[in-house]
Every structure is written in C-alpha cells, then in structure tokens.
Amino acid sequence: MQANGADDPGRDAGTPGGEPLRSNGLLSGAAADGDGLSPGTGTGGSATPAPPGSGSIKKKKRLTQWDEDLVRLIGQHLHGLGLNQTVDLLMQESGCRLEHPAATKFRNHVMEGEWTKAESDLNELKALMRSPSAVVRMRFLLLQQKYLEYLEDGKVLEALQVLRAELTPLKYNTDRIHVLSGYLMCSHAEDLRAKAEWEGKGAASRTKLLDKLQTYLPPSVMLPPRRLHSLLRQAVELQRDRCLYHNTQLDSSLDSVSLLLDHVCSRRQFPCTTQQVLTEHCNEVWFCRFSNDGTKLATGSKDATVIIWQVDPDSHQLRALRTLEGHAYGVSYLAWSPDDTYLVACGPDDCSEVWLWNVQTGVLRTKMSQSHEDSLTSVAWNPDGKRFVTGGQRGQFYQCDLDGNLLDSWEGVRVQCVWCLGDGRTVLASDTHQRIRGYNFEDLTDRNIVQEDHPIMSFTVSKNGRLALLNVATQGVHLWDLQDRTLVRKYQGVTQGFYTIHSCFGGLNEDFIASGSEDHKVYIWHKRSELPIADLSGHTRTVNCVSWNPVYPGLMASASDDGTVRIWGPSPDPQDSEDLGEGCHSMDS
C-alpha cells in the first residue's frame, strides 16, 4: 500500500526550512501557508501543480481536531482507491498530513521487504509511541516475517541466523520461537505456508503484518487500516441494532447499503399479518412448536390429537401432513428431538404417560409410564438426541432413553417445566417453590439459579443458553440472565394469570420475544425494549402458545383456546411494505 512520500522513502522527514510538524497531523502556520507541497503531506513524490489561474492554494482557516481527523480519514480512503493526486491536493489545501513521515518510511520499507531499514525506522518511531515496550513486540513481528521469507526462499542458514542471533536475544514469546524453530523441518514452501498458516512472501502477508504493527502506533502517527470503512460499518450496524423491526439477514459489507439514507424497516415487513388460520383441531389448541429445521409445525390440542403441518419453503403456507392420534388425554406440551426425527407429547396434570412418535412414519415408538399416579406434563430432549427428561407437579422427575427405559430419577421435585442445556449434563426445572434450579444427573448435584416471587408457569431458554424467558403468574413475561443469575427485564402489556402460557424467542438472531395472553392477543417485544412493538389481534379466546420459526424469521404461529392456529407473516401487499409511515423507530424515541 502506497502512502505519502512513497516514491521517495528516504526523503527528509521534516518540512522546508525546518518548520515543525504538529503531532496531530497539521503543519505549523508558516509551512501550511506555503505555495508548494511540503514533503510528507501527500501520497506521491512530487507536488500536484495548481490548476491554471487558480493561484496558490492556501489554507483558509484553522481546522478543528475533528475536521483534521475527518480530512485524514477521507484522504486514506481516496488513497485506497488510487486517487493519489486528489489526496495530494486535499492534504496541501487543508494543511494536514495523512500520516507521520517516519510512519511512511516504515510502511514502504516493510512492503518492500527491506527489514534492516524497517528495524532502523523503529528507533525513530519509538519516541512517538505511548508504550516504549511495544518496540520489542514490533521488532519480533518484523523478524518473524523476515525469518519465514528466508525459509520460503530456501535460505536456511540465513533463517537460522535470524532465529539465533536476532529473535532469541529479544527474550520475548519463547513459546512462539520454539514453534518457529520447528518450521526449519519443512520440506518445501507449500508445507511451510500450511503449517505456519501464512500467505507466503509478498504483498498479502506484508499487508497483514502492517495491520498488526499499526496497532502499536498512535493513530496520529499512522491511521488504522480502512478506518473510514470501519466507522461507516459500525454506524450501519448500530442503526440496524436500534431498528425495532429489523428482522432480515443483510450482507455485513457496505456494498449493499446506501449511505445516503438511514436504515429503515417497516412494521408491515414484520410478521404482524394473519397469513393462514388452521382450523383442523376440534377443541382448544394448547401448544405449538416449529421443528428445528423450520420445515414442520406440530400442534397439540385438548381433542387428544397432534397434527404435523408441512411448511412450504417458498410461499410459507402450511398444509396438514399427518395426525397423530390415540392419546388418552389432551396434548399440552410437545418437544422435537434435535434431528426432528421424533416428537414427544405430554398431557395435562392427570396424564401419567409420555408418547414418543416417529414423525417421518407417524408410528408410535414408545409410550412411557412409570406409575398411574404420575403427572408428566413437561419434557425436554438431551442435546445428544438419545435421552429425554420429563416431570410433573406430583414429585416425578425422570430421565429416559428412546425406548422409555428409566435411566435416572430425582425424587421429590415438583416440576412445572424442564429444559436441557447444551452442555448435555444440566437440566433446568421450574418447581412449585417459584424458582428454577439446575440439576446434574451425572453427579446428582443441584443449585438454585432463578428465584421469583410468584409461580413460574413456563419458561424457555435462548439458543446460546444464556437467557431464560419466564411466564410468571400475575406478573407477565420476565427475562433472566442465567449466567449472572439476574433479572434483566420485565415486559409490559401481556395479561398473565394462572393459565399456562408459553412465550418464545424468535426472529433474526433471536432479537425478539413473543407471548400469548389471556386478553386474546399475541404480544411482540424487541428483546431490549420493555414496551411491546406489536400486539396482534385475531384470536377470540386465550392465546396459549406462540412459536417463531427458527429458519424463516418472518413466520410465526400462535395456538388458542378458540380452537385455531394462526400463522403470522409480513403484509402481502407490496404497497404496505413500501409505506414507511409506520416504520422503524429508535428505542430512544
């Protein structure tokens, strides 16, 4: 990468007549008002002639520090585009310099592989560093590159000399030196590049080296690489984070983003519109959950059936795939196995059985029951897909295999809801003491994690296992941090009594939370906002459960006592999608 003074790296680092250079990049007054291009101010080796008739270009006013920084950022970006004459003119007129002349020499020597000169430049840069000890680290990086390039060129003796006489005496990062010494055994260049995870001698590896070296230099001396690009990307990401309705996967680069407009998502692009009403159940629908791969939806009803629905990947319309019948009671809870092959169904309080179905064939694999006095109302899969845990409020807490064989049990735990964490060992269970405890079946230990003041009717856990979403009787929806064991947020709006209502995380990156409610609505919040960003009407009785599709972030399902399942999606009217009247609002507004 070329920089100011790149064509003449050995030129005098000062200004004509010995004029001082300010550390923030401005030339002092006399030099700034000069007619010519001062050394070290542009990107080329000579001044750009002034346009005919324009006269001498002079700095019109003293720039603020903010303006100086902005000019340098713009200059760096233009230089990256190859517009070097434009950069020369910009630096000349503004009186700024892109980087310190010593840094320019250092950059050129590194990119040209002149390691002795680059090491010498470090002595000049040392006085400009905040931490003089950083020179040792920078020298180590330079010598490491020098060593690897010698090895690639087959100059083993020269490489060995660098290792013994230059790297080792630094007494820095001896572990890395041992690793470097092992590269002497590499039989050919390809082997060296593979083992060292190195691009090889040339511009690519030297540019990466410069990026590492720059981190030890103040930005007043050398700007971080692509600094303007980094700032703009951060601004775009911040706008997306503050967008209440952002729910689409976008390219992380700036190529697909307009910098001329603020990021805006319309509420009507959000799953707030009823796409389908599924009426195949003939009684209250107590539960619904999408499969892990997003291709199916399972619904359980008071009519003692489970219906498996197929999701069309293009239209996102659902059609009934098969009905699983034979349950002695209604179906109040469902859990998909990690690979979506099996589905476990539980019933209400009086149900002592757990039904394990093969979803692909519709065949009941096993019906697990330990005692007719049991109450098995909740179930969760171990991440290995070979075990599940189940329990209820009569003091049963079991771990079983796929054939229903009892593997472990925990006596005296009155379970309301269970969840298996990703470590494969810890089972979370809410109990009748208004708490969530963690149970380890391997060493038979347990610990308190969450303590509420009211009954926990249900809970769910985020994919990363960090957050838990609780539906708390008479209180509503609470968000807890399981790692810090702290209450993060209480969400407002939902009506929650003593009915069991199931909420969920959902949307892109699980940025949203949705819950049913006893006032017949579905409520949606952004995870960081206590107030709902949408409340969805359509059901005529209590909404018992909400499930957000894990693959299609614009697809959501809700199950209600009115006997229907509603499928929610974006507005189908393209005019609505373009209407920004109800668009993104900042959380600060």
Image (spheres, rainbow, N blue to C red):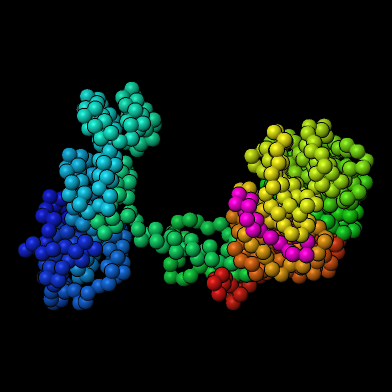
In percent of the image, x 72 and y 50: which residue is there?
436
In the picture, measured across the screen, residue 156 lies left or right of residue 252, that is: left
Q: Nearer the viewer, residue 114 or 165?
A: 165
In magenta, the rendered stretch is: 471-487
Note whether 133 is above or below 242 in the view shown: above
Note whether 369 is above or below 38 in the view shown: above
- The x, y position of residue 523, in whole percent, is 71, 66
Q: Quadrant of residue 339?
A: top right
Residue 570 shows in the view: no
Does the magenta run of residues contain 482?
yes
- The x, y position of residue 547, in whole percent, is 72, 56
- The x, y position of residue 335, in whole percent, is 76, 46
Note whether 493 is above or below 288 in the view shown: below
In percent of the image, x 59 and y 77: which residue is there?
581
In percent of the image, x 68 and y 37: which residue is there?
425
Does the magenta run of residues contain 24?
no
* Quarter of the picture holding the C terminus: bottom right
Q: Quadrant of residue 508?
A: bottom right
Residue 131 shows in the view: yes
Q: Nearer the viewer, residue 443 or 349?
A: 443
In the picture, measured across the screen, residue 152 lies left or right of residue 44, that is: right
In the picture, measured across the screen, residue 336 lies left or right of residue 362, that is: left
Q: How many numbered dots are placed on residues in this image? A: 0
Q: Nearer the viewer, residue 235 or 369?
A: 369
In the picture, measured across the screen, residue 256 lies left or right of residue 420, that is: left
Q: Quadrant of residue 585?
A: bottom right
- The x, y position of residue 43, in whole percent, is 21, 58
In percent of the image, x 69 and y 60: which residue is there?
478
